[in-house]
Amino acid sequence: MPTTLRQHGFVVRIYGPPREHPPPHVHVERGPDEVVVIRLGMSGGPARVWAVYGMTDQDVVRAVRLLEAHLGRIEEAWRALHG
């Protein structure tokens, strides 16, 4: 699973085939038990929180903002892995 971005204590990862599945999404981790899964817009739509595991609401907001700030780069990385 490539690490696409590491910033402010967050790690953005994209899992590759065959483990991963549609729709396009990333896993943003803050610690071993803190993860938010965010669906990518991919067609100009907004990124959306899909699932939260152990992460505070405040950190979820931070993770979404981080993703939005680097969305083009992250979407390119997803396409490179998944086509």
Image: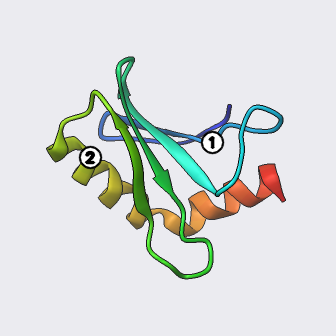
Q: Which x, y percent locates residue 57?
A: 17, 44
- Mark 2 belongs to which amino acid? Val
Q: Which x, y percent locates residue 61?
A: 23, 53
Which corner quadrant of the image does residue 2 belong to? Answer: top right
**Residue that numbered label 2 is attached to:** 60
Local SS, label 1 = loop
* Front residue of 50 and 11: 50
Q: Which x, y percent locates residue 70?
A: 47, 62
Dot label at residue 82: none
In this rendering, position of residue 80 left or right of residue 78: right
Image height check: is 9 above or below 12?
A: above
Image height check: is 22 above or below 36?
A: below
- Mark 1 belongs to which amino acid? Ile
Which corner quadrant of the image does residue 79 belong to? Answer: bottom right
In which quadrant is the C terminus drawn? bottom right
Task: Farthest residue to the top: give it.
Answer: 32
Task: Farthest residue to the bottom: give it.
Answer: 44
For the point 58% across and 58% down, the residue is: 74
Q: Which x, y percent locates residue 11?
A: 45, 36
